[in-house]
Amino acid sequence: MSPQPGPDYARLFRKGAPEPTPRFTGFPKYNFVGGHNDPTRVPVAALAEAAAAALTREGASLALYNLGHGPQGHAGMRDLVVDKLRRHRGVACTRDDVLITSGSLQGLDLVNDLLLEPGDTVLVEELSYGGALSRIRKRGVTIVPVALDGEGMRMDALSDALDGLKARGVVPKYLYTIPTIQNPTGSILPLERRQQMLSLARAHGVPVFEDECYADLIWAGAQAPPALYALDPAQVIHIGSFSKTLAPALRAAYAVAPWPVLSRLLSLKTDGGTGAVEQMLVAEYFSKHFDSHVAALSGVLEGKLQAMLEAVAREFGSAAECFVPKGGIFLWLKLPEAVDVRKLVKPAAERGIQFNPGPEWACDPESAKSQLRLCFALPSKEEIREGVAAFARVCYEQTGIPAQSGNIRHAPG
Amino acid sequence: MSPQPGPDYARLFRKGAPEPTPRFTGFPKYNFVGGHNDPTRVPVAALAEAAAAALTREGASLALYNLGHGPQGHAGMRDLVVDKLRRHRGVACTRDDVLITSGSLQGLDLVNDLLLEPGDTVLVEELSYGGALSRIRKRGVTIVPVALDGEGMRMDALSDALDGLKARGVVPKYLYTIPTIQNPTGSILPLERRQQMLSLARAHGVPVFEDECYADLIWAGAQAPPALYALDPAQVIHIGSFSKTLAPALRAAYAVAPWPVLSRLLSLKTDGGTGAVEQMLVAEYFSKHFDSHVAALSGVLEGKLQAMLEAVAREFGSAAECFVPKGGIFLWLKLPEAVDVRKLVKPAAERGIQFNPGPEWACDPESAKSQLRLCFALPSKEEIREGVAAFARVCYEQTGIPAQSGNIRHAPG
């Protein structure tokens, strides 16, 4: 049989179908994007042992959808979430309040799918997680930004935004916030602001959608107030993840919410359940080793942040303003207004450097055209130093900024 | 702080948000629904060993999204798919043609999301997988049924359906078919019909969406012609799964399709990747043990089918017409027209019996009101015998049918 041409697929795709994804050709040498973690900090031997133990004990139940534990997920995994949230985030909940999700991205999708339709409005921190912004935009929903400062969302700005919407008769569907290790600015919202935020949310009847993906990775000595969910469970839909504390290729995250919400998220979660082996593995390993693993990992990450801060200071000098994070895996930078980071993406990629351009992390893309996010968990300290130097060189070649790196004054490339 | 009532969520949910899911209270005693498998046939020790081996060898790469293998999935898992499809389904493809999905339900969702919008039309076998039907309906898409007989889809019916649509100027978005162990009738489409189907699909420019979820579970001695994808790769979007051959709580499935399609499915798969540990585990175990495991499992399943056929014959006698499957995990039954199985759901549940009412597996629900699906992989032979007897009793009490079970003539309950 001779090869057939196939149907005219381009004519069959639905309106607005996304552009094709190019073939994957590997990661860049200096990979400063994404939620990757440090490969040397994956507890390989302990995970192998935990997987074998859990499978030996519970493996037969893999024959049942959701292991027979129901669609909210593996009971041990939910108990792990309950215990972690109680000890670290001040939350009092039970396994009945927890829904295990296939990554926190699924949590975002489920909450959006429950609440949002085209024409709706949501409130979001002016700089926020790119994956959340793109998902909201794809649904044709209006994003109202709320200003940030070094401690997170500004309550005067939130109050003004809510009043402004109220005056126009608009009830926003939710207030999306990353209060603990804000993405991308790395701040921790103080307790007083948390209480003000909840008070405003209650007064306006707006649910708070709290994303705590990075909240467990806090530098030693830094303190985080209780989660918003801990302070007012009825008002808050809370999501979190183990992808950042253990490994992102594991899709092990959770949502915690009032039952009227959770029971409908369940109805929208039509995936046949989150992968059971990953749940068994995370429950087995982290029910014994969460605190010690996270403390050690946070120490390593803080060391990498220091290496990156030093490299940025050395290579960019006063041209870069750093938002020093209190935890997490990323650094937010502001370059002079004359620099449009979007124009650096391609020349940087040609030198093997990838970074997150600020506009992708901003409600108003233009406002963040000189800002960028650099992730530091994956690269080694040496790669951080080399990569930041190479990036400064690219930036200089394209914009003349920074004019000096280290004690070297650049000559035109 | 006194408990707060929370926002008025019911007013905030989007239009058409689904009803809440009730609390999970465990499986019924006689569980004849769903893709569960036989807990005694999960190779627990070998899986524990495989997980430990794979994690020890590759665990560090969990720190990278998709293990650094790219969004199509774990390389070894894709190679497993390629090898299995080559040896068992006549398919020539490479790992570049394969997308690993989190269960074949995700494959259904991605293909639907790429092709369908409200008002579209698709062709589906008149009896088909309930999960596929409900997903298509949710998108506001018209389903045109194509008649089945004991060998699967009838080609005269397909030809008529395509001509009828053409006459009305309608180009269907796809023809969804389960050619190998049809769900729910258990048939295998002969080679000649496969070639006719592809010829018709080509002539009308309609993609064939081939679902082979059960194709690996075929009774010894039965033969299956090559997959439709093997016969014309350009015309076919193919999905399959390891959930049925290994364990459904593992979400390990795949799609194989021409790159113009696959590259766009990738753009729609915004989940951060399918769980990596499950992929590592399936690749490790099944790259060594696929044939032996599946042969042994199929033998066990065929034995359970025999137990179910005997129980149905004993309890229902000539009142039940069985569609004896050539593989898989379910039996399709037809009861006399006087029986509306929808009215048996509640009384059966009160006796601990759950089954799939025919209407949920039919393009035209009313046409299948006397039909039902019984899954036999999970229950033991004893549970099959007891459960079928209990179900016959319920059916008799509600409808007077069957009047006799075994050599017992029923007295009114």
Image (cartoon, coloured by chain):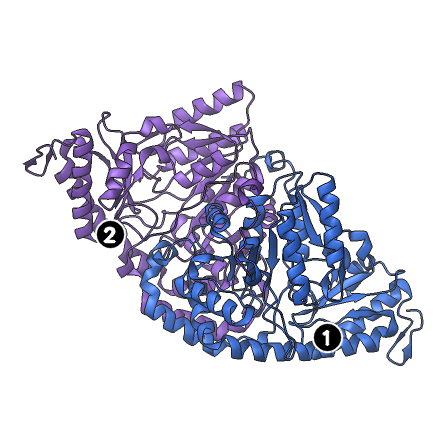
Chain colours: A purple, B blue
The picture places residue A235, in percent across and down from the top left corner, at 52, 38
Task: Give above or below for A270 relative to B314.
Answer: above
Q: Residues within 10 Å of mark 2 (few under 14, many from 20)?
A: many
**Residue positioned 87% across, 70% down in the render:** B319
User: Quick one: A144 or A178, which is closer to the camera?
Assistant: A144
The residue most toward the top is A167
> CA separation, marks 2 and 1?
56 Å
Judge from the rendering whether residue B67 lies leftward or rightward of residue A70; answer left or right.
left
Chain bearing tag 1 is B
Q: Quadrant of residue A405?
A: top left
**Residue positioned 63% across, 54% down in the render:** B23
Q: Residues within 10 Å of mark 1 (few under 14, many from 20)?
A: many
Judge from the rendering whether residue A59 lies leftward or rightward of residue B399; answer left or right.
left
- Would residue B114 be visible to someone looking at this image? yes
The picture places residue A213, in percent across and down from the top left corner, at 39, 47
User: Quick one: B11 or B151, which is closer to the camera?
Assistant: B151
**Quadrant containing the C terminus of chain B in the rendered view:** bottom right
Judge from the rendering whether residue A138 lies leftward or rightward of residue B338; answer left or right.
left
Q: Secondary structure at mark 1?
A: helix
Residue annotated with mark 1: B384
Q: What is the three-letter code of the residue carrying label 1?
A: Ile
Q: Say whether mark 1 and mark 2 are on the same chain.
A: no
Task: Give above or below for B403 relative to A193.
Answer: below
- Would residue B22 be visible to someone looking at this image? no
Task: Give above or below for B409 relative to B3.
Answer: below
Chain bearing tag 2 is A
Judge from the rendering whether residue B231 lies leftward or rightward of residue A125; answer left or right.
right
Residue annotated with mark 2: A379
Q: What is the three-letter code of the residue carrying label 2?
A: Pro
Marks 2 and 1: which is nearer the front? 2
Give the number of the disc on residue A191: none
The picture places residue B343, in percent across and down from the top left corner, at 83, 57
